[in-house]
Image (cartoon, rainbow, N blue to C red):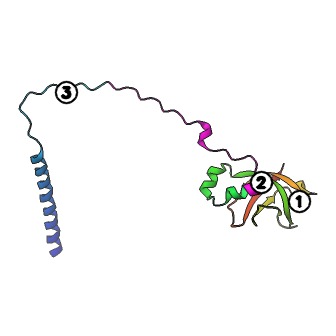
Amino acid sequence: MQFRTLATLTVCSLALSAAACKKSKKDDAPAPSKAPTAAPAPAPAPTAAPAPTPPPAAAAAPAAPAEYSPEQLFKAMIGVGRMDMGEKFPNEMADLTGAIAKINDDPVGEYVLEFDAGGGNVVAATILARDAFKGVKVGDTVHLVQCGLTMPEPTKLTVVNCNRK
C-alpha cells in the first residue's frame, strides 16, 4: 500500500510541475500587439540544387601493386585485420616474385616454398601443381601468381594455392 501511495504522489507531482512549466512559458511570451501588421513577404522561389559530382575513380581506392617481393608482401600484411585485408586486397590474392630460401617437399603433405622476408621473417607459399616446380632449387627466383592470402603470424606469412607463371 505504501508503494502505491508513493507512486501516486510522484505521478501527481510530475503532472503539476509539467503544468507549471507550460504556464510559465506562456507568461514569458510577449503579448500580441494590436497594431496592424504587414502581410508576410513571399518566400523566394526554390532553386534547383546542383547535382553532386561523383568522386574520381582513381581516388576511390589505391590500387594494390600487381606483384610483390617477399619483403613487400610481408610488410603490407603485418597488422592487417580481416576487414582491412578485404579493402587492401579486394580478391584476397597477390602475386609474389622472389628467390627461394627453402623447399619443404613432404611426400604425403604439401609442397611449400619459403622466401626470406627480411628481419628473420618468412613468407611460405603452398603450391598446388607440384609438377610445375620440378627442377627448382634453393636460390632460384620464381614468379607465383594468384596466391591466396592468410592472416600473418608474428614472423611468418603463409600464402596458399599458388601457381607458377
Crowdedness of circle 2 by 10 Å Cα count: few (<14), some, many (20+)?
Answer: some
Q: Residue at x 54, y 34 (%)?
A: 54
Helix, strand or loop for disc 3: loop
Q: Is residue 1 visible?
A: no
Which residue corresponds to mark 2?
Answer: 69
Query: If you read the primary sequence from the N terminus, does the residue marked by circle 1 or circle 2 appear first?
Result: 2
Which residue corresponds to mark 3?
Answer: 40
Q: Residue at x 13, y 49 (%)?
A: 25
Helix, strand or loop for disc 2: loop
Query: If you read the primary sequence from the N terminus, does the residue marked by circle 3 or circle 1 appear first?
Result: 3
Q: Is residue 51 visible?
A: yes
Measuring from the top left, give residue 124's x and y in whole percent: 78, 62
Quarter of image, res 42: top left
Q: CA distance from mark 1 to mark 2?
A: 14 Å
Q: Nearer the viewer, mark 3 or mark 2?
A: 2
Q: CA distance from mark 3 to mark 1?
A: 87 Å
> Which region of the structure is painted magenta?
45-72
Measuring from the top left, give residue 61's x and y in whole percent: 61, 44
Q: Nearer the viewer, residue 148 or 32?
A: 32
Would you say 162 lies left or right of 61 here? Answer: right
Q: Amino acid at mark 1?
A: Gly
Residue 139's disc number: 1
Q: Amino acid at mark 3?
A: Pro
Q: Residue at x 85, y 67 (%)?
A: 108
Measuring from the top left, give residue 96's x and y in whole percent: 78, 53
